[in-house]
Amino acid sequence: MADNYIERKMEELHNTKKTVVKRVGQSLDTLLLRNRSYRGYDPSAVVSEALLRRIVEVNTKIPSARNQQVLRFKLITGTDASRVLPLIRMGASLPELHLPFVGTEPPAYIIVCSSEKETRLVDVDLGISAQSMLLKAVELGFNGLIIGAFNKEKLKEEFALPIDPLLIIAIGKGVEQIRLTEISADESHRYYRREGIHYVPKVQMDDLVL
């Protein structure tokens, strides 16, 4: 009986010391759902170089394949943003809309470059970096878009980049309505717009697992 008493008291003591984990800030799921690809932005929302630096700063904390850390970043804000627009293409699946609409152009960009020739490992870093920066932008109350369709040579010349640009990330306050819609793996993955809402098909969980 004495043994049972001691065991019971030890269990009570253990239970009182259990750590309660409280979430601070937004959950990862919330950030991921808010991290949509915006092609229209609020022209009144100013994106400063200081904000872009906070976004780029995530690269001092994230993983890097072989720890090579070859990515470098050119920050474009203010009137210089208009120099990027003619060199990029947005909304390739909706060419009839000629995005972005006049007055909703991105107010800032991060040009992602590499100090080494692009390889599979550089592309691994590129994906990690782009996603991490966009999640940081969302955490700070902004939105973005990864742009892979751009004139590399003209961009390099326009901004006197000493190394090759690999991606452009637009940053601003998104003004579009974007919704995810669940699909099976064999349905069309093409995004579309209906009654002013941008729909993005996402393959359902059961089809993702082999």
Image (cartoon, helix red, strand yellow):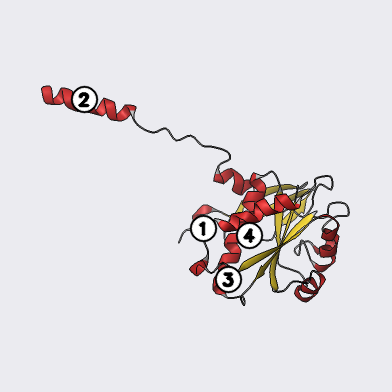
Q: Counting residues from the N terminus, which is met first, the one under dot 1 or under dot 4?
A: 4
Residue that mark 4 sits on: 130
User: Which amino acid lies under the numbered mark 4 shown in the image of this protein?
Assistant: Ala
Circles 2 and 3, Cβ within 8 Å, touching? The answer is no
Residue 60, image x and y in percent?
57, 57
Of marks 1 and 3, the one in the foreground:
3
Q: Counting residues from the N terminus, which is met first, the one under dot 1 or under dot 3?
A: 3
Q: Counting residues from the N terminus, which is met first, the one under dot 2 or under dot 3?
A: 2
Q: Is residue 6 left or right of residue 110?
A: left
Circles 4 and 2, Cβ within 8 Å, touching? The answer is no
Residue that mark 1 sits on: 207
User: Which amino acid lies under the numbered mark 1 shown in the image of this protein?
Assistant: Asp
From this view, report whether residue 184 is shown above or below residue 118. above
| Front position in the image: 75 or 171 | 75
Circles 1 and 2, Cβ within 8 Å, touching? The answer is no
Q: Residue at x 51, y 58 (%)?
A: 208
Distance between the alpha carbons at the discs numbered 1 and 3: 29 Å
From this view, report whether residue 28 is shown above or below residue 207. above
Distance between the alpha carbons at the discs numbered 1 and 4: 26 Å
Residue that mark 2 sits on: 8
Q: Counting residues from the N terminus, which is met first, the one under dot 1 or under dot 2?
A: 2
Residue that mark 3 sits on: 122
User: Which amino acid lies under the numbered mark 2 shown in the image of this protein?
Assistant: Arg
Q: Residue at x 76, y 65 (%)?
A: 92
Q: Quadrant of residue 210?
A: bottom left
User: Which amino acid lies under the numbered mark 3 shown in the image of this protein?
Assistant: Val
Of marks 1 and 2, the one in the foreground:
2
